[in-house]
Image (spheres, rainbow, N blue to C red):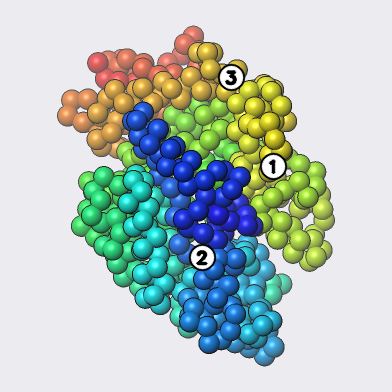
């Protein structure tokens, strides 16, 4: 979408135009029809919680207090010569921005160039639904619905209890999955994609717990097909960089699997454009790079739900660690660095935190080949490519049967070949095992056993393999069946 790119395109200034550097609407139409000819469906991101401050709606809204679109955004007077309340923005600093012309503040949960739309105003909702319907008319196959759990705010706009040492307070409770949101979601669905049974929707649902999942994705009350849950990947703590607590991770993933045992559908993922790379966090970028990339892949890929693969995950791309903040583009990272440096933290400590947390870690250009910029472009990319591109790239892995890419191909083939991997029940095995994530999928007489050692230790497992065929494996076969090597993963099918 057309965008000033303050937040890598999540600040949209025209929902029905393609950003010039990516082409034109005609290119988009051609792309979609060529994809359809090849049996590929295309879903697009829908960013409806906010627009860019350069969107004509906001330009009109901010022009005067009497503007017809004033109430399309959330404007408030200041309090005691300061912001209307102490809410912190998700991207650091106050969630309010002062507007000189009209002498009021506007709310922005994300960057100051992403003013929040006022969903309470029916005219705003009408305008958004019209946009969505025009995309449906254009033949789009579905939507990833951005930040959708934030559209409803706590309308008291009251202060949060102060937190010592903080001027602004993390404000999620005031605007994430707030009571009343389902009225908006239901209307949104009814007025747009409800009549398109073949259109798929996946909502980004930060703050939604498994106990509420069916309100979002159940066959009766659901508003969309799937949601991305934040609880499992949220166990990564960039402050401590602590190792994965495997038991807790299993408990979290299993809670979601069980919540959607007989209804609803999971969106399965281990990486996305807002998270750091799995090999760099809980995996290993050294000796166990291949093993850890494929172990985490095996662990999530065969669960009940639709697995999503984030670009570069399938070749084991890893985090970047640049020395200076100027190399970074992520607005959240830059704001955080600026605010915490001003508060007295050291550059070295902050860069360490940036490496472990910045969204740019996973946003570097896709590594296609050993050519300049990883073969991504002959121009100048918006971010430097990861230095490891001469060795970690698609071309290197394409024909190598022992590559991460080949392993992903095998996983996809396996998943598609066996209905049990789509429809089968999920049951966690060995819940208390502190290193291994193991589970079964069962359907009628069929049973699949999936196991992945998520640590760099050799561990024992209570499994002898008798009566099972090993159908996928990321290790060597000489080790004992009762022992998993570091990051070893196996998938068995009962004979
Ligand atoms: C979502 C997106 C993220 C973006 C934010 C604001 O969390 O995934 O990349 O910055 O919404 O639109």
Q: Quadrant of residue 443?
A: top left
**SS label for mark 2:** loop
Does residue 91 appear left or right of residue 423 in this picture? right
Residue 102 % position (x, y): 63, 85
Q: Residues within 10 Å of mark 3 (few under 14, many from 20)?
A: some
CA distance separating discs 1 and 2: 25 Å
Q: Which residue is mark 3?
A: 395
Q: Quadrant of residue 364?
A: top right
Q: Quadrant of the C terminus?
A: top left
Residue 304 % position (x, y): 32, 38
Residue 99 % position (x, y): 66, 79
Q: Residues within 10 Å of mark 2 (few under 14, many from 20)?
A: many
Q: Which of the marked residues, 1 or 2, is nearer the chain's N terminus?
A: 2
Q: Is residue 109 at all visible to an observer of this figure?
A: no
Q: Which residue is mark 2?
A: 50
Q: Which residue is mark 1?
A: 383
**SS label for mark 3:** helix
Asked if disc 3 and disc 2 are in contact, CB closer than 8 Å, the reply is no
Does residue 416 appear left or right of residue 150 in this picture? left
Q: Residue at x 58, y 84 (%)?
A: 64
Q: Residues within 10 Å of mark 1 (few under 14, many from 20)?
A: some
Does residue 174 appear left or right of residue 181 in this picture? right
**SS label for mark 1:** loop
CA distance separating discs 1 and 3: 21 Å
CA distance separating discs 3 and 2: 39 Å
Q: Tell whether circle 2 marks a residue whose Cβ is less than 8 angstroms from ligand 1.
A: yes
């Amino acid at each position: 979408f057309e965008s000033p790119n303050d937040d890598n395109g999540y600040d949209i200034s025209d929902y029905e135009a393609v950003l010039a550097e990516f082409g034109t609407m005609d290119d988009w139409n051609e792309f979609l029809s060529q994809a359809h000819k090849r049996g590929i469906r295309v879903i697009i991101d829908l960013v409806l919680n906010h627009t860019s401050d350069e969107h004509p709606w906001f330009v009109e809204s901010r022009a005067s207090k009497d503007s017809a679109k004033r109430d399309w955004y959330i404007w408030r007077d200041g309090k005691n010569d300061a912001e209307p309340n102490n809410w912190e923005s998700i991207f650091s600093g106050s969630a309010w921005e002062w507007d000189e012309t009209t002498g009021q503040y506007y709310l922005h949960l994300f960057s100051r160039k992403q003013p929040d739309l006022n969903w309470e105003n029916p005219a705003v909702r009408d305008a958004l639904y019209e946009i969505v319907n025009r995309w449906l008319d254009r033949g789009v196959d579905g939507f990833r619905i951005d930040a959708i759990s934030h559209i409803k705010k706590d309308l008291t706009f009251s202060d949060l209890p102060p937190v010592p040492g903080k001027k602004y307070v993390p404000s999620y409770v005031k605007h994430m999955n707030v009571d009343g949101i389902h009225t908006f979601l239901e209307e949104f669905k009814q007025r747009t994609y409800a009549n398109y049974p073949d259109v798929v929707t996946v909502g980004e649902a930060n703050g939604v717990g498994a106990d509420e999942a069916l309100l979002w994705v159940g066959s009766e009350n659901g508003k969309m097909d799937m949601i991305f849950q934040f609880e499992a990947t949220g166990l990564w703590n960039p402050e401590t960089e602590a190792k994965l607590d495997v038991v807790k991770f299993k408990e979290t993933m299993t809670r979601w699997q069980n919540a959607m045992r007989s209804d609803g559908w999971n969106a399965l993922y281990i990486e996305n454009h807002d998270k750091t790379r799995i090999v760099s966090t809980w995996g290993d970028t050294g000796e166990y790079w291949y093993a850890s990339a494929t172990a985490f892949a095996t662990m999530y890929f065969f669960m009940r739900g639709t697995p999503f693969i984030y670009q570069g995950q399938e070749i084991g791309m890893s985090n970047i660690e640049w020395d200076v903040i100027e190399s970074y583009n992520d607005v959240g990272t830059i704001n955080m660095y600026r605010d915490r440096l001003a508060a007295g933290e050291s550059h070295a400590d902050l860069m360490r935190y940036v490496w472990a947390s910045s969204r740019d870690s996973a946003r570097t250009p896709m590594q296609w080949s050993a050519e300049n910029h990883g073969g991504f472009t002959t121009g100048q990319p918006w971010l430097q490519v990861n230095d490891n591109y001469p060795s970690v790239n698609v071309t290197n892995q394409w024909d190598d049967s022992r590559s991460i890419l080949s392993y992903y191909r095998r996983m996809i083939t396996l998943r598609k070949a066996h209905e049990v991997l789509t429809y089968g029940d999920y049951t966690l095995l060995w819940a208390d095992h502190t290193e291994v994530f193991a589970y079964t999928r069962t359907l009628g007489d069929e049973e699949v056993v999936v196991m992945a050692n998520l640590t760099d230790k050799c561990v024992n497992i209570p499994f002898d393999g008798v009566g099972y065929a090993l159908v996928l494996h990321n290790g060597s076969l000489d080790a004992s069946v009762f022992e998993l090597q570091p990051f070893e993963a196996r998938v068995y099918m009962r004979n």
